[in-house]
Image (cartoon, rainbow, N blue to C red):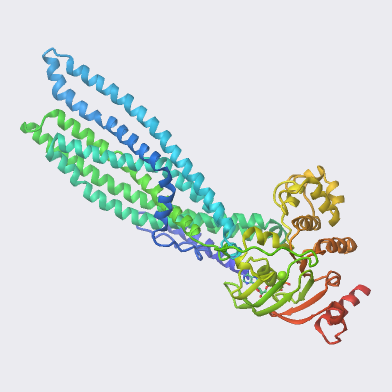
């Protein structure tokens, strides 16, 4: 299905590419409409909504703690601009005063001009230096803060969010998007401020030098302002599209790398390359759109600038000839106007970094505006202490119903009581809702109706550390974090000593293989030689769970990678880890199920059989009995 999709799209692409190539030479001079964008992938669906005003609020919350340094930076920039903009004024003074004075043998004014220039040059340099340092301080702080916020927030968001929002997009938020904000803060903002300041300073000086000439310059600001507004509107669209497109490129790259094994197994390289190429071209096209907008702006602004200069020079020259304008003033005015329009191209650059940062900031704000669907309790409750005679905790599902965001109800209305210390095995066909049940108990999700209770306390009211101690879930993935084997086991209880870690590993039967690793417990699991097999990973995950010593333990297919010859060892490990606690074990392997006190058979989100393994096997026409018979026969065969 996907294969056909890809090849059709790739086919369309090729056709389009040759079509465009054939048209281009013939169409020289004629306006060739750009070929339509390649079909966009599913990446701009599901962009998070950005609440009204969230972007501005985010920027304010980033800058306001650093208000003082922002103010210092702004002040330094004003001083620097004053020093820079004094130049033409000194030229006017030199032409109109110092030269005539020199003719009268008075060197004073010329010396004054020279000293003024030197002072301004040194001042401008010093202020610039101080500004760069102050601004860097602000921008570094802001970026540090923002990256930290993205990380913390992403981690705080619930499982269902991460199922929708791909990791590639998160990576893009905290790299490409933070980077575009960095550009704005470290270069763009300085550009903007200096351009605005020089506009104000120059306009003031021109008006002061000569009202008429100044008025022409100021009048030219009006079309320029309109052009800037138009450009901003169009650039905003272009940059938002560009940032979405680069995120899509990152998403595709991340997905391919994460799934490199299936990619290799199914020889998906070509197909992936085509899809990647398509996204890459979308990005290129969107980038091209953004550049085109900028080119239009530059042409427009130059046109306005040159017209203004021409008008001023013509009118000024006429007035100098007339005697109503001093030559020095005209010279200074022309210098100023040149300076005025010099930074215009840079202004476009700045607007680019502004638009691109605004688009990025909006996306980050959208992410930060998401709230976890499994929130921390407002007033947290604690679990009662576990009495010595009843190990583990009592679990109750009370009319609990659940539906994933997408799709229908998985658990219609679920009632189940698991007494403390009981080991319950859950079996049932694929998609019956077993993992969903487990995830509700681990509070990865909250039920859409009803409650899940742990020793009579609603999971939603449990304080986070209580929940962590109360329920632990081990899944098939048995994920290992970068770090040593010992560190990975200690995730179960960070304050555990090395003895306790080893004890847990021994109890599970993981000690032998760990001891045989190159550095034993100190082997880095991500380094060469530290790679461990899927079954070994599950043993490490078991040791981690044992060390955590939770009141309720959930195993979801957690023994699926352990080999059958090692079955006895697996059973021993299971006995150890399940002892003295309430347990929910989801397993396809019936040997694992047999150690349970009670078996639940689930179909379509309901319990269809419930009893001890012996009773269920005895019920001749039962589902479990059927499964059991098939399993026995497979063993014999
Ligand atoms: N994250 C999800 N988003 C939407 N639907 C989901 C999600 N996870 C599971 N489902 C749906 O919920 C139903 C129950 O899934 P669940 O994972 O609980 O089944 P299961 O009994 O654990 O199956 P298996 O034995 O294959 O692990 C399935 O129909 C599945 O398509
Ligand atoms: Mg499952």
| Residue 274 relative to residue 352: left or right | right
Q: Which residue appears farthest toward the bottom when viewing the image?
A: 621
Quadrant in which residue 249 is drawn: bottom right
Q: Is residue 137 above or below residue 145?
A: above
Most foreground residue, 402 or 301? 402
**Residue shown at 82% from the left, 85% from the top:** 622
Q: Quadrant of ligand 1?
A: bottom right
In the figure, residue 107 lies in which quadrant? top left
Can you see residue 353? yes
Horizontal side of residue 572 vs 135, given as left or right: right
Judge by depth and name the residue closer to the eye, 98 or 630. Answer: 630
Can residue 565 be seen in this snapshot?
no
Farthest residue to the right: give it: 636
Residue 136 position, x and y percent, is: 44, 37
If the image is split into quadrants, where does the C terminus sit?
A: bottom right
Residue 632 image position (x, y, % from top left) = 90, 76
Residue shown at 27% from the left, 44% from the top? 302
| Residue 38, percent from left and from top | 49, 62
Q: Residue 446, how many percent across, how many down?
A: 61, 70
Residue at 51% from the left image edge and 44% from the top image edge: 144
x 73%, y 70%: residue:
394
Horizontal side of 341 relative to 386 (left or right) equals: left
Which one is in front, 526 or 346?
526
* Tally of numbered discs: 0
Looking at the figure, which quarter contains the N terminus? bottom right
Question: Looking at the image, is 496 positioned above or below residue 38?
Answer: above
- Foreground: 586 or 636? 586
Classify residue 93 as left or right of residue 300: left
């Amino acid at each position: 299905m996907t294969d056909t999709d890809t090849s059709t799209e790739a086919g369309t692409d090729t056709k389009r590419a040759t079509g465009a190539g054939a048209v281009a030479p013939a169409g020289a001079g004629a306006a060739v409409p750009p070929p339509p964008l390649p079909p966009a992938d599913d990446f701009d669906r599901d962009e998070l909504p950005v609440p009204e005003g969230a972007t501005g609020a985010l920027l304010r919350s980033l800058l306001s703690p650093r208000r003082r340094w922002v103010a210092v930076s702004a002040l330094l920039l004003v001083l620097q601009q004053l020093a820079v903009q004094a130049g033409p004024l000194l030229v006017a003074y030199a032409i109109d005063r110092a030269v005539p004075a020199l003719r009268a043998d008075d060197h004073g004014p010329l010396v004054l001009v020279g000293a003024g220039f030197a002072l301004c040059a040194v001042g401008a340099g010093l202020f610039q230096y101080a500004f760069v340092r102050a601004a860097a301080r602000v921008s570094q702080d802001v970026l540090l803060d923002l990256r930290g916020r993205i990380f913390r927030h992403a981690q705080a968001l619930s499982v269902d969010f991460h199922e929708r929002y791909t990791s590639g997009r998160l990576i893009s938020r905290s790299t490409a998007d933070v980077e575009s904000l960095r550009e704005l803060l470290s270069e763009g903002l300085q550009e903007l401020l200096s351009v605005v300041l020089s506009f104000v300073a120059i306009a003031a000086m021109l008006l002061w030098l000569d009202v008429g000439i100044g008025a022409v310059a100021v009048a030219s600001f009006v079309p320029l302002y309109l052009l800037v507004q138009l450009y901003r509107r169009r650039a905003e669209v272009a940059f938002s599209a560009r940032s979405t497109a680069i995120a899509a490129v990152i998403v595709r790259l991340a997905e391919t790398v994460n799934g490199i094994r299936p990619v290799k197994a199914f020889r998906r390289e070509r197909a992936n390359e085509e899809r990647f190429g398509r996204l890459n071209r979308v990005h290129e096209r969107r980038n091209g759109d953004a550049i085109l907008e900028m080119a239009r702006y530059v042409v427009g602004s130059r046109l306005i600038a040159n017209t203004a200069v021409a008008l001023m020079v013509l009118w000024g020259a006429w007035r100098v000839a007339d005697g109503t304008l001093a030559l020095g003033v005209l010279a200074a005015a022309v210098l100023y106007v040149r300076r005025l329009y010099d930074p215009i191209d840079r202004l476009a650059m700045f607007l680019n970094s502004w638009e691109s940062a605004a688009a990025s900031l909006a996306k980050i704000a959208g992410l930060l505006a998401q709230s976890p669907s499994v929130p921390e309790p407002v007033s947290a409750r604690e679990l009662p202490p576990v009495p010595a005679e009843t190990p583990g905790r009592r679990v109750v599902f009370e009319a609990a119903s659940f539906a994933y965001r997408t799709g229908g109800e998985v658990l219609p209305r679920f009632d189940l009581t698991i007494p403390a210390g009981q080991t319950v095995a859950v079996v049932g066909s694929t998609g019956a809702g077993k993992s969903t049940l487990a995830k509700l108990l681990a509070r990865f999700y909250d039920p859409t109706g009803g409650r899940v209770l742990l020793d009579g306390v609603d999971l939603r009211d449990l304080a986070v550390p209580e929940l962590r101690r109360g329920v632990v879930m081990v899944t098939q993935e048995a994920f290992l974090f970068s770090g040593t084997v010992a560190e990975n086991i200690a995730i179960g209880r960070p304050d555990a000593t090395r003895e306790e870690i080893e004890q847990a590993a021994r109890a599970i039967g993981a000690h032998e293989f760990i001891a045989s690793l190159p550095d034993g417990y100190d082997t880095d699991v991500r380094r060469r030689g530290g790679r461990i097999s899927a079954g070994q990973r599950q043993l490490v995950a078991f040791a981690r769970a044992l060390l955590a010593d939770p009141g309720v333990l959930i195993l979801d297919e957690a023994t699926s990678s352990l080999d059958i010859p090692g079955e006895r060892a697996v059973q021993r490990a299971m006995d150890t880890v399940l002892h003295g606690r309430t347990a929910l074990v989801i397993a396809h392997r019936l040997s694992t199920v047999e150690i349970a006190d009670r078996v639940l058979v689930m179909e379509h989100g309901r319990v269809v059989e419930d009893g001890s393994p012996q009773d269920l096997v005895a019920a001749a026409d039962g589902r479990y009995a059927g499964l059991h018979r098939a399993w026995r026969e497979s063993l014999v065969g």
